[in-house]
Image: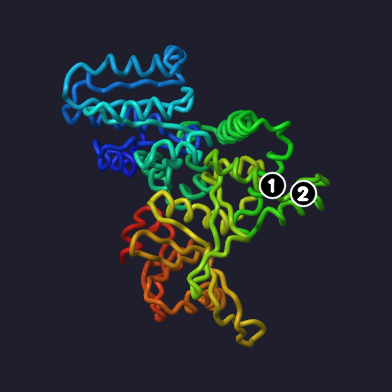
Amino acid sequence: MEIARDLYLQKLIDHRQNGLVKIITGVRRCGKSYLLFTLFYRHLLEEGVPESHIVRVSLEDYGNKSLQDPDALYAFVKSRIEDGAPYFILLDEIQLVPHFESVVNGFLHIPNADIYVTGSNSKFLSSDILTEFRGRGDEIRVYPLSFSEFYSAIDPHTPLNRAWLQYATYGGMPLCLSMKSEADKAKYLQDLFATTYLADIVNRNNLRGNAEINELTDILASSIGSLTNPLKLSNTFNSQKGLKFSANTVSAYLDYLQDAFLIERAVRYDIKGKKYINTPSKYYFVDMGLRNARLSFRQQEYNHIMENVVYNELKLRGYSVDVGMVEGNLKLNGTSQRAQLEVDFVANMGSRRYYIQCAYRMPDEEKRRQEQASLLGIKDAFKKIIIAGDDVLTGYNEQGILIASLFDFLLDPEKTLNW
C-alpha cells in the first residue's frame, strides 16, 4: 500500500538546495523514513538526478552499523562525492551517530551537497543542538496520517462517517492502516506505546522505572481538551493514585513526553489583553489511536477526540495554535452574565488568524448560542469559525460566523479557512 504524503513532499521540494540542513522530525513510526527514502528519493530520480548523486544511509540498518561512527560516516559520504554536480545526502535516524551535530555541520561545507536528516528523540532537538546548527537547520515536522491522507488510502467506497469512526478510534499510524483486524490494530498501538515510546523515554532519561510515566500518560489520555498544570497533575497523583509525585517532577515528565513528540502543549492566550497565560494549559496527543490505546479503547468521547484531531490538523498545516480566553456574555438560568469564555483555538500563520470552536454536536438553538458566545465576544475582524461534527452545510450564519462541516475542514482545510 502506498500513501501519498504530498504536503510533506512539497515541503521538501520547496526547501531543496536552500543552503540549510533539512531536519525531518516526528514521533517514531509516523513515516519519516518512507517520506525521505521512498517519496523524495523517487521525486529526485523523476527530476533527472542520477542515482549516483543520491547518498542514502539508514543508520538503523544493521548493515550500516559501522557508519554510526562519526568519522566513518563523514568519510563514506565524502567518498561518494566525485564531481561538482549537486549531490543529495539522505541520512535516516542521525541521532544514532555520536556528535552528529559536528558531522552534519561538516557536510554543510561541501558546496554541492544538499543535506536531509531524520530523527525521533529528544536529544535531536535539544537546545544545545539548535545552538550548534547556528540557524542552519530547517525543521520539517511530520505527523501521523491526517484524516485526508487516511481517507485517500482506504476503500474508496467507505462512507465518510464510517471512515471517521475508524480514524477516531485507531488513528493514523501508517503501519496500523495495513492491518485488517481490530485486535491486531489495538495490539500494535498498545505495544508501540509501551515497548517503543515509553521504553525510549525511560532509557533516555535514566528513569528508575516506568510506573510514574505510565500513570501520567494515562491521566493525560483521559483528559484531553482539559486545562491542567503540573501542580494539578501532582495533586491527582497524590489523591487518586496514592503516589507522591512533585509538581517539578511532573513538569519534567511532561517535557519528556513532548520531546518524544507524543504530546503537544497549547498555551492560553488572553485575546483582549493580547498576552499569554502560561498556566493552566491543554495537552493533545499526536495520534488518536495512540491515545486510545493507553485507555484500552474504553474512553471514546468524540467531542474531545474531534478537538484533538482539529488541533493536529492545524499544526500539520503549519499554524501555531493557542487556547483562547475572552470576556463575553453567557446565558445561565435564563439570565445573561459576564464571564471568562474559552475559545478552543487561536490559529496563527503570518498575518492570518482564525478563532475556532469545535462542536461535535449542536442539536438545538441553546447549544448553538453556547458555542458562539465566546466568538461573539471577540471584537476584531479576524475570521471566526465553528467546526461542527453534525451533518451541516458549510456557510455563514447571521452573526458572520462560519459554520464549517468537520469533513469539509479535514478534507480541504485551506478552502474552509479561506472561504
Callout 2 secondary element: helix
Q: Quadrant of residue 212?
A: top right
Quadrant where the C terminus sits is bottom left
Q: Are marks 1 and 2 in contact (CB under 8 Å)?
A: yes
Give x and y (percent) for residue 396.
37, 74
Give x and y (percent) for residue 129.
46, 36
Crowding at mark 2 (Cα within 10 Å: few <14, some 14-19, many 20+):
many
Q: Amino acid at mark 2?
A: Phe
Question: Is residue 272 in view from this perspective?
Answer: yes
Q: Is residue 355 above or below residue 297?
A: below
Q: Which mark is residue 148?
A: none
Please report the residue visible at 24 percent of the width from the left and 32 percent of the height from the top: 43
Classify residue 22 as left or right of residue 211. left
Please report the residue visible at 69 percent of the width from the left and 47 percent of the height from the top: 250
Q: Amino acid at mark 1?
A: Val
Callout 1 secondary element: helix
Crowding at mark 1 (Cα within 10 Å: few <14, some 14-19, many 20+):
many
Q: Quadrant of residue 15?
A: top left
Q: Which residue is mark 1?
A: 250
Please report the residue visible at 48 percent of the width from the left and 61 percent of the height from the top: 389
Q: Is residue 12 above or below residue 389?
A: above
Give x and y (percent) for residue 38.
33, 28
Please report the residue visible at 48 percent of the width from the left and 23 percent of the height from the top: 98
Give x and y (percent) for residue 200.
60, 30
Q: Is residue 171 above or below residue 384?
A: above
Q: Which residue is mark 2?
A: 237
- The CA span between labels 1 and 2 is 10 Å
Instruction: Say which of marks 1 and 2 sits in front.
Output: 1
Question: Is residue 169 in view from this perspective?
Answer: no
